[in-house]
Image: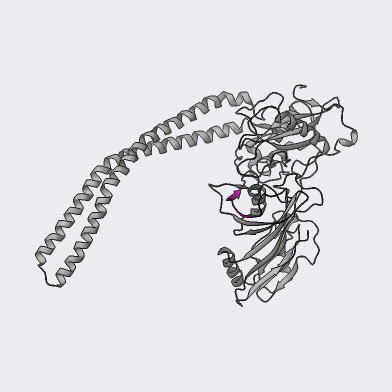
Amino acid sequence: MDAIVTYLDPPPAAHDVPARMPSPFAPGPPCLLARRAAERLRAEVEHAGLGLDAPDGGKMFGVLVVEDAAGRIGFLRGFSGMVNGRWDLPGFVPPAFDQAARDAFWIAGEAELVAIAGRIAAIDERIAPLCAQLADIAARFEPDGEALRERHRAAREARHAARAAGGDREALDRESRMHTAEKRAHDLAYRAAREPIEAQVAQLEAQRRTLDDDRAARSRDYLVRIHDTYTLANARGETRKLRELFDPARRRSPASLHVGPAEPPGGAGDCAAPKLLACAYRHGLRPLALAEVWIGAPPVTGGRMAGVYYPACRGKCGPILAHMLQGLDVEPAPVFGGGPIADDEPRTVFEDRWLVIVDKPVGLLSVPGRGGTLRDSVLARLRARYPEATGAVLVHRLDLDTSGLLVAAKDPETHRELQRLFAIREVEKRYIAWLEGEVAGDVGTIDLPLRVDLDDRPRQIVDPVHGKAAVTDWQVLRREGGRTRVALSPRTGRAHQLRVHAAVGLGAPIVGDRLYGRSGRADGERLLLHAESIAFVHPHTGERVAVTRSAPF
């Protein structure tokens, strides 16, 4: 066990040991003890030559501060997934699954799937030259066919004119029949050249579909068997299978932080936190504090930065840690929103018979959340404020952590018209933000498509293939104290667009950003992002509505 546990020397003072284990889901820097262990791990990893600085080569690492039966305090090291194709590295905890049980079927199973993939690739290699032949045939016949159609069209027009002028109908009909036969001969020749090859392609594609279906079925079967190699314990010694934790119908614990899908997401159980806890329980160690830090180059999708501490992901780790932490005295996971907001918020800054514009404070949701403590929102308050309105529906939204101007309609027609203005980008919006770091350049446009991170909602990531278009214009207003004050004008309205575009596109996250920032968020520090102005043509009066509320920072 000593080979896995690194004991702290000198031992920490009693006041440095947390009375309760901090929640792994809390944003911001970890407790002092976990940070001390994580910084030591980070220094070791950065000098180990693991290739983490290669493009897209970074990795999430974690430490778990533990206490052994003798009262000695040390820490375990772990990493998410694999490093350089390996599950095990000296000095790091092993994976959470049963390696022997997995090897018993997966070594042969992986070879089987590779063999099927090879057969699919071989079919693709046979299809490729056939498709090239079809392209060559099309290149030979289609220009001739187009020329034939054009010649026949001109001749047809000439015949129509000749018939109108009383020309020889028999000769004209003969020419028409000749052109019909000519077209039929061309089409038959084209079909005769094409059909034998198309038949070969169809046969090969059918074989490929069969192999694809076979591979998919076998992959699903192997995935179930892989999931069954994870038997996860908690501090009480109770064990659960991985799939059980993600299936609401079979989950026996009511304490889950997340109602997950029936199937575990990819990589579930392989994050650093479950590995570390599993190892601690196997060796009779009491977990005290957990920290996860990104080391190495950021992913191309964004959302992770070197040296930054991140909370455990709720998509993959929420249901797992809800079980594994039972039996420990752990601080509750933070619930964002639902805090006290003054009764007169949000303040109205513009109002007429059709619409209202309010200044949303930080910490108030735009629309109600799912939890019982998250029912309070701008929408709920506006509906209470305007009981006679038939709409009072928000036309757009702001993040919980963002302050600023929001537009709501009082009737469905106004709501539709305002939504149309947003859709055709005829609403001018301007945000003010302070960014961490000094931005290069003074003005520009960020064009990075975004989608939700399926494993860590609500985090968004850059995805040029599956992401939705997201465009932001930016301008530097001031540089001061290592920070940059900018104006951001989104052309599109994707979730977290400005936050991701600042962090990834400009390489300078917004100050206080608990999701995309460099150091989480300290207590009492807000996200320095404010929707300062909005302007549009009123859908009923035709007059320009322009409202500004300066940023409170």
Q: Is residue 11 magenta?
A: no
Give the residues drawn in magenta, as a range: 436-458
Residue 331 placed where, x, y %? Answer: 80, 43
Residue 210 placed where, x, y %? Answer: 41, 36
Residue 130 visible: yes
Residue 459 placed where, x, y %? Answer: 66, 48
Residue at (69% x, 65% y) in the render: 533
Q: Is residue 395 above or below residue 78?
A: below
**Residue 278 left/right relative to 395:** right
* Magenta-drawn stretch, dominant element (helix, strand or loop): loop
Screen quadrant of the C terminus: bottom right
Residue at (73% x, 32% y) in the render: 42
- Between 318 and 473, which is closer to the camera in this rendering? 473
Residue 144 placed where, x, y %? Answer: 24, 51
The quadrant where residue 398 appears: bottom right
Q: Is residue 442 magenta?
A: yes
The quadrant where residue 78 appears: top right
Q: Residue furthest right?
A: 14
Residue 278 visible: no
- Between 219 and 190, which is closer to the camera in this rendering? 190
Screen quadrant of the N terminus: top right
**Residue 191 left/right relative to 53:** left
Q: Residue furthest front?
A: 441
